[in-house]
Amino acid sequence: MKLRAPISTAVAISFGLLVLLGIFIPDLADFRNRILNWAMLLAALALLLGLFNLAQVHWQRVRGRETVVYSAALLVTMAITFAVTLLQGSDSANAEWIFNYVVVPIETSLMAVLAISLTLAAARVFQQRTELMNMVFIVTLLLLLVGAGPLFGVELPYFTRVINPYINNVLALGAMRGLLIGVALGTITTGVRILIGADRPYGA
């Protein structure tokens, strides 16, 4: 039975206020932790349902002769990883082998593709618009690429020891902190709007 909007809104606001008050009132700490544990269990269940939905979609593609190779490879690897993790645990030797020799190389390859894609995108942007900020972005990107490591076996000490650390530790770190502060302020604003009932992501 679907809850009506006033009831679901009242439940969401009540639990949100209890979690918020549990931070400041020690007597509510245990109840707050219990609510958070419920939320984590529900999130894990939602992730498991999403996993089954993904498997169902690719199984339908295999039956319909659509992208059979890729869908079959995904289903087989998904089943093996799920079975190993479920039976042996995430800290087992086989699970760590899958993570270290399958997941990590794939993520590294994707990051390498991302670096090349950013470089090509920067070149296209520079061809279309020669604005000041675009030039700053391209120059910074080139400095980072040159200072990331030896270029064709030749290391440029000034770039790798002076410019690249300054960009990473000062400019990039400052920009990242600014982004995190913006995300935190946006999260607080969204939470307040949910607590007062202005936003209702849980239902109409």
Image (spheres, rainbow, N blue to C red):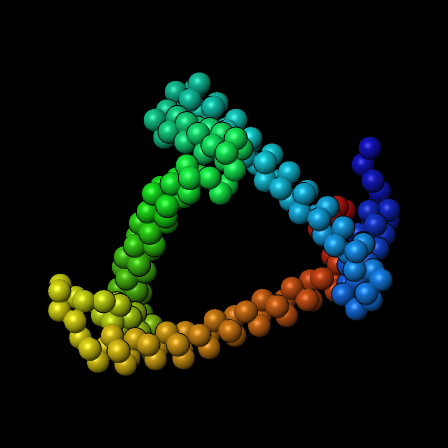
Residue placed farthest to the top in the image?
A: 63
Q: Position of residue 113 (x, y in %)?
A: 30, 52
The residue shown at (29%, 70%) is 144
- Comparing 197 with 92, the one in front is 92
- Comparing 62 with 172, the one in front is 172
> In which quadrant of the rendered view does residue 98 lie?
top left
Residue placed farthest to the front in the image?
A: 93
The residue shown at (64%, 38%) is 45
Q: Position of residue 135 (x, y in %)?
A: 30, 75
- Residue 150 seen in render: yes
The residue shown at (58%, 66%) is 183
Left or right placement of residue 144 versus residue 71 in this view: left
Q: Is residue 183 above or below residue 7?
A: below
Q: How many marks?
A: 0
Q: Position of residue 148 (x, y in %)?
A: 26, 68
- Comparing 87 with 53, the one in front is 87
Q: Position of residue 133 (x, y in %)?
A: 36, 76
Q: Is residue 199 above or below residue 92?
A: below
Left or right placement of residue 122 versus residue 90 in this view: left
Q: Is residue 182 above or below residue 5?
A: below
> In which quadrant of the rendered view does residue 70 lie?
top left
The residue shown at (49%, 43%) is 91
- Comparing 173 with 33, the one in front is 33
Quadrant containing the N terminus in the rendered view: top right
- Residue 117 seen in render: no
Left or right placement of residue 6 versus residue 102 in this view: right
